[in-house]
Amino acid sequence: MEINFAWACASVVGVVFIFAGIQKLLAGIEWLVQAKQLRPPRITQPFVPMVPYIELVVGGLLIAGVQEIPVRMLSIVLLSSFTALLFARLAAGERPPCACFSFRSTRPIGWSNVTRNVGLIALLVASIV
């Protein structure tokens, strides 16, 4: 694996995913309670408890540079789905606590959460092109 701009961009997102996954696992059931307040679509609800594990695996793969393009594209889909959920809640005037990184944050979601995710998606796009 060559250390270059593309890898560095993907690795930043990988570190964010790993941090978020660890924080969620440390929070245990308290994180799940907050995550459910975001009201994910019914079809995705069975997968909500798996989010921390998915973040850890995907984050590790991004840093390790394994299957670079498919993993980066999967990461874009993952972040886009999180961002769409945040956008939907904000557009509906709802501001539940952000369960993005930890249950410790009781700050309600805001447009800064969407902006952060768009920035992470931009890093992933930059790592592909």
Image (spheres, rainbow, N blue to C red):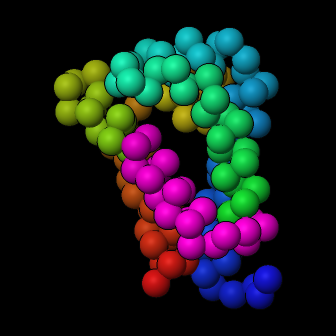
Most foreground residue, 58 or 20? 58
Image coordinates for residue 31, horizontal then vertical, percent: 62, 19
Give the image quarter of residue 84. top left
Taken as a whole, is the magenta stretch helix, strand or loop?
Answer: helix
The answer to whether residue 66 is magenta is: yes
Q: Tell me where residue 56 appears, x and y as whole percent.
A: 73, 45
Q: Is residue 2 above or below residue 68?
A: below
| Residue 19 drawn at (x, y percent) | 72, 45
Task: Judge from the rendering whether residue 3 lies leftward or rightward of residue 104; answer left or right.
Answer: right
Instruction: Say whether residue 21 is left or right of residue 94.
Output: right
Q: Is residue 127 above or below residue 46?
A: below
Q: Which residues are magenta?
A: 63-82
Q: Give whichever of 70, 118 is nearer the camera.
A: 70
The quarter of the displayed image where residue 13 is located? bottom right
Q: Left of 110 or right of it: where is 20?
A: right
Which residue occupies 79% across, 83% down? Answer: 1
Horizontal arrangement in the rendering, residue 54 relative to residue 26 (left or right): left
Q: 96 or 3: which is nearer to us?
A: 3
The residue drawn where x is 44% and y is 27% is 44
Asked whether 58 falls inside the magenta stretch, the response is no
Q: Is residue 110 visible?
A: yes
